[in-house]
Amino acid sequence: MSAEARVEPGAPVLAVEDLHLTYVTADGDVPALRGVSLEVRSGEVLGLAGESGCGKSSLASTVLRLQPASARVSGRVLVSGEDVLTLRWGALRAVRWAGASIVFQGALHSLDPVQRVGHQIEEPIALHEPGTSPAERRRRVAELLEQVGLPAARARAYPHQLSGGQRQRVMIAMALACRPDLVVADEPTTALDVMVQAQVLALLSELVRGSGVAMVLISHDLSVLGQMSDRVAVMYAGRVVEQGPASAVLGDARHPYAAALSGAFPRVGDPAARFAPSGLPGDPPDLRSLPPGCPFAPRCHRAAPTCAEAEPALLPLAVPSGPTSAAGPAGPAGPAGPRERLAACVRLEES
Amino acid sequence: MTSHPDGPVLEARGVSVRFRTRAGEARALDGADLRVRAGEIVALVGESGSGKTTLARTLVGVQRPTEGQVLLDGTPLPTRAKALAPFRRRVQMVLQDPAGALNPRHTVYDSVAEGLRLHGLSQGADGRGEEQQVADALSAAGLRPPEPLFLRYPHELSGGQRQRVLIAGALALSPQLLVADEPVSALDASIRGEVLALLLSLRETLGLGVLVVTHDLGLAWNVADRTAVMYLGRVVEEGPTEQVLTDPQHPYTQALLSVVPEVEGLAPQVLRGEVPDPTHVPAGCRFHPRCPALADGRAEAAGVAAACRGTALPVLPIAEDGAHRAACHLVTPPG
Ligand SMILES: Nc1ncnc2c1ncn2[C@@H]1O[C@H](COP(=O)(O)OP(=O)(O)OP(=O)(O)O)[C@@H](O)[C@H]1O
Ligand SMILES: Nc1ncnc2c1ncn2[C@@H]1O[C@H](COP(=O)(O)OP(=O)(O)OP(=O)(O)O)[C@@H](O)[C@H]1O
Ligand code: SF4
Ligand SMILES: [Mg+2]
Ligand SMILES: [Mg+2]
């Protein structure tokens, strides 16, 4: 598969370095990403979590340089080693679809209602591989539909003739049409029924395992991320506040926000969650007027005066981690690699 | 369980609702029984299209059943709109705010007072004026102190606060039962907990009975005393939440639990096929075309395979003893 051809084994397919994105609006600037660093390797799923408005979709768009032209961006987005943010237009077009593709949030409604779905899947192939014959392209479309579990004959259907789950499969087939190394899936199952969600998630897992694509999976549903991801990053107010292996971040979150978020997703059968819904009081932050210091402090049950002094850096956590003893970060032992277990909270050092 | 045996009881008995559609008659509800008592939270779960909303609407008298009855304290719901008014006050429906249930041009005060005015209750029987009743309802919904919120508009509130205002609007009428259709599904996880905690505290403090319609089994685990599972217009399993969710009997419930990410450690049984079609309810057991127990030979081994394909199951009756029951030939072999 192309993944091996373009990317050295073990090298990140996606590396995001200190990415900032500010929307410029009539009511002022909205700093939606405030220094995000992440990486994803081939065959790996990175789950991205956080409450509405924390910047997940903004990150997804910027990875493909699809942010509004008026927005201010800085930092680097390396897709298979090439910086998407500085590429020339022609090279960027090659990266979109073939290097990286995206399944948009709310995409169920973004298919063209008057075009047969087969034609819509074929379009990016025709655009990127103009040498292919119409017959070859039709064969590719049939293969793609089968790969996403739809009969090839469904190519002739119009979107309204398909159920929500089937349309979502068509969107995934489109995203795979040019054999990308990286797929960004933004809430791919949110509007779907539980059973159909299970079908779509099983399909995505197979794709990652079978063909070695790298995936960024965005969901507000932590239990979906727990099931699907190798690593999870939790965002708050435009920053990553905790990241690490999925089981560690979801089962033993250290950042108070990440802990509150994972507590809000009870495991069925867990006696501690019975008649004890847990949530997080307070309002989500207003990006236009963030408080000084840690933006989570106004809602944080562990906040102390030091929290308002400076925004906490994302630092490595000591590993192995016991429940109380080793909760502090390892200290400034070296540059924080984006793959380590990291958290951004000054109070972790003090516990 | 804190259910009040003498408090009000809302029941659906053998309720069917049919809609005429282009594809034929849709049996959105096809003989559903359900009971909600004061002081009890019941979760109604199931796939999309299984009839949860239709049953909720029927229970509050918004949807008239084609067959069967809804009873409050054993008295059938009147069919004339006028006679329904006192019933409507006792059983309130709570909608979901992101669907635009709050009028963006109404203040919090007016949103809560609207129901009182509609029912001619602005001057309460207990001597409380409208303002006092609005303040009390907002407080009961956890918005304390209520006065500073009176003149706010929905866009000036957080998602959790908006959902609480809707609940306050229902509470203003001093209902005995609430029916809430997906009350938190569009809210952020962090905000969801606060609304669920409110439902639990209303049950404790006011002895309120609540039916929550949800597709979220984690929510049922969080708050529900009992859980009812719907499939294609019927309740197919019902009982105490601990039993239904940790020891499911019906093959459909087993499959549902195996695929939801909130449940760990079950081998996923992804059912094939799309959402079942209420214009073509299968003969025999309505679940049999998708049933893993029939497909893998368990039904055959138990000698019920023929019944699965050909013998319809009776409507699950309301259990007097709060027992755990499932409508499946494997669970109760045909006699
Ligand atoms: N085009 C835009 N112009 C101005 N502000 C924007 C724009 N797009 C997003 N925002 C703002 O940027 C912030 C981040 O939005 P984003 O869509 O990335 O959030 P999200 O994490 O994807 O949320 P959700 O879970 O609701 O999808 C929000 O405050 C949002 O209002
Ligand atoms: N007014 C109507 N006319 C025709 N069919 C209807 C009508 N209302 C509901 N139905 C059908 O009845 C069935 C049950 O619908 P209902 O809305 O009760 O399902 P639900 O369990 O609430 O689903 P969801 O989880 O998607 O909200 C569906 O197949 C639906 O298409
Ligand atoms: S009655 Fe038969 S087909 Fe229906 S759920 Fe039980 S085993 Fe499956
Ligand atoms: Mg988004
Ligand atoms: Mg519904």
Image (tube, rainbow, N blue to C red):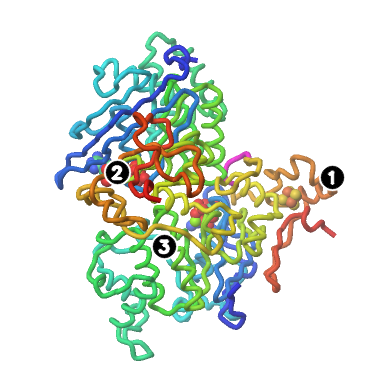
Magenta region's main secondary structure?
A: loop
Q: Nearer the viewer, mark 3 or mark 2?
A: 2
Which residue is identified by label 1? B301
Q: Nearer the viewer, mark 2 or mark 1?
A: 2
Which residue is identified by label 3? B194
Q: Three-letter amino acid code at disc 3?
A: Glu
Q: Residue at x 25, y 68 (%)?
A: B107
Residue B124 falls inside the magenta stretch: no
Q: Three-letter amino acid code at disc 1?
A: Ala
Front residue of B122 and A219: A219
Q: Residue at x 24, y 21 (%)?
A: A86
Q: Check the residue under mark 3 and report the chain it is in.
A: B
Q: Are marks 3 and 2 in contact (CB under 8 Å)?
A: no
Front residue of A101 and B116: A101
Residue B89 relative to residue B272: left or right? left
Q: Check the residue under mark 2 and report the chain it is in.
A: A
Is B86 situated above or below A26?
Answer: below
Q: Which mark is residue A312?
A: 2
Front residue of B26 and B139: B139
Can marks 2 and 1 be said to lie on one chain?
A: no
Mark 2 secondary-structure assignment: loop
Which stretch is magenta? B272-276
Q: Residue at x 51, y 69 (%)?
A: B210
Q: Three-letter amino acid code at disc 2?
A: Pro
Mark 3 secondary-structure assignment: helix
Residue B319 image-quadrant placement: bottom right
Q: Earlier in the sequence, mark 3 or mark 1?
A: 3
3D distance between C-alphas at marks 3 and 1: 48 Å
